[in-house]
Image (cartoon, helix red, strand yellow):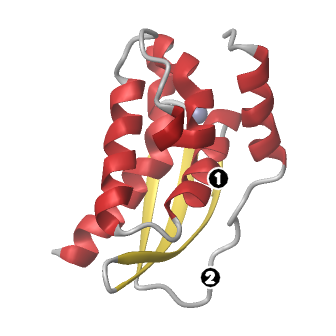
Amino acid sequence: MELDSLYQEVILDHYRNPHHKGLSAKSDIQVKHNNPSCGDEVTLNLNLSDGLVTDISWDGVGCSISMASVSVMSDLLIGKNIKDANKILQNFTELMQSKGQGSGDESILEDAVAFAGVSKFPARIKCALLGWMAFKDASTQLLA
Ligand code: ZN
């Protein structure tokens, strides 16, 4: 798999020094998601307050793409209101479905545009989306 080297660096950096890794003691909800085709596992804690994503913390094992993606996602979504968080989630999902055609809107996705090249590799898309799907599941359950 070849990704643009700058993007590869962003991914490896988050993989080596993951942000918000280590589960918080208290959370409004905890979900576990896995990606059996690659062996990736993520446990995600989410706190929401007054429609605001006040905290995301996580733990997991898996490939560099899955772990880096949940790290980047946590950075992006903490502090956002749920409407903006869902917009970012939607934007990232569309990027992953772009089959290598999309480059991502950096004003919305920030570091997450680094995963644009992953959309060319169908087997890895689930890796990149794992943490995001965990967030979607957790927030949907909390707001139900
Ligand atoms: Zn993976």
Q: CA distance from mark 1 to mark 2?
A: 15 Å
Ligand 1: image quarter:
top right
Q: Is residue 136 visible?
A: no
Query: Looking at the image, which residue sits at the far bottom?
Result: 26
Residue ranking furthest to the front? 107
> What's the amino acid at mark 2?
Ser
Whether 129 is drawn above or below 122: the answer is: below
- Please determine whether, in this image, residue 25 is positioned above or below residue 119: below
- Proximity of marks 1 and 2: CB atoms separated by less than 8 Å: no
Q: Is residue 49 left or right of residue 73?
A: left
Q: Residue at x 71, y 25 (%)?
A: 7
Residue corresponding to mark 2:
24
Mark 1 = which residue? 71
Q: Is residue 94 left or right of residue 121?
A: left
Q: Of the residues tagged 1 and 2, which is closer to the observer?
A: 1
Q: Given the image, on which type of amino acid does mark 1 rest?
A: Ser
Measuring from the top left, give residue 66's x and y in whole percent: 59, 40
The one of 28 and 9 positioned closer to us in this rendering: 9
Q: Quadrant of the C terminus?
A: bottom left
Residue 24 picture location, percent across and down: 62, 82
User: Is the residue marked by circle 1 packed among few (<14), some (14-19), or many (20+) residues within 10 Å?
Assistant: many
From the viewer's side, name the closer residue of 105 and 128.
Answer: 105
User: Is 20 above or below relative to 9?
Assistant: below
Q: Residues within 10 Å of mark 2 (few under 14, many from 20)?
A: some
Residue appearing at x 24%, y 66% in the figure: 140
Question: CB at mark 2 closer than 8 A to ligand 1?
Answer: no
Residue name at image x 32 percent, y 66 percent = 82
Residue 20 lies in what quarter of the image?
bottom right
